[in-house]
Amino acid sequence: MRLPLIALMGFFALFGRPIAIDLAFRADATCQGSACLNIYNVRVGTRCNTSDSIEADFSNDSNSLYLRGYVVFNTPKGKFYVTTNLMKPGQKISGPAYVCHGSGTPIGIANTGSDPNHLPYPDQR
């Protein structure tokens, strides 16, 4: 029991941080596509003076990839797509994604990549 504990303490002395932090960073950096587009803080009735407006914040949860995509809302006339524009790794955006007459929870579709100059929007579905 003592030997593994001594080895772990030696690791911390050499590298200065726990293993768990490195593993969490790698796991977060490996998301791809729509899995990196996090939609959160969904609010109802905050826009357009309508009780059925839906607004959401969104972020790029990758620590290493750029993202370009859409926040997709359901409306009585079909799907409504709000572009994310190009998002840097880890970037969060509040407020510009909303629809005046919507229902349900918005979803995200996205493409990710390491080259921001050659990153297309995903196909609308």
Image (cartoon, rainbow, N blue to C red):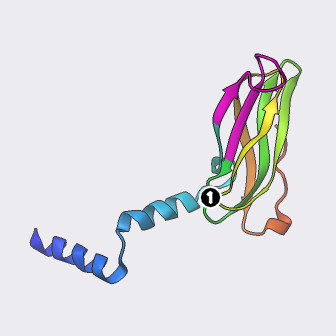
- Rendered location of residue 24, percent (x, y): 46, 60
Give the number of marks. Answer: 1
Q: Is residue 21 left or right of residue 38?
A: left
Q: Residue at x 44, y 67 (%)?
A: 22
Would you name the residue on which mark 1 appears? 62
The picture quadrant where one finds residue 91 is bottom right
- Mark 1 secondary-structure assignment: loop
- Rendered location of residue 114, percent (x, y): 72, 68
How packed is label 1: few (under 14 Cα within 10 Å), some, or many (20 or more)?
many
Front in this rendered view, residue 80 or 90: 90
The correct choice, above or below, for 56 with respect to 89 in the image is above
What segment carries the magenta color? 41-58
Q: Residue at x 81, y 18 (%)?
A: 50
- The magenta stretch spans residue 44: yes
- The magenta stretch spans residue 110: no
Name the amino acid, label 1.
Ser
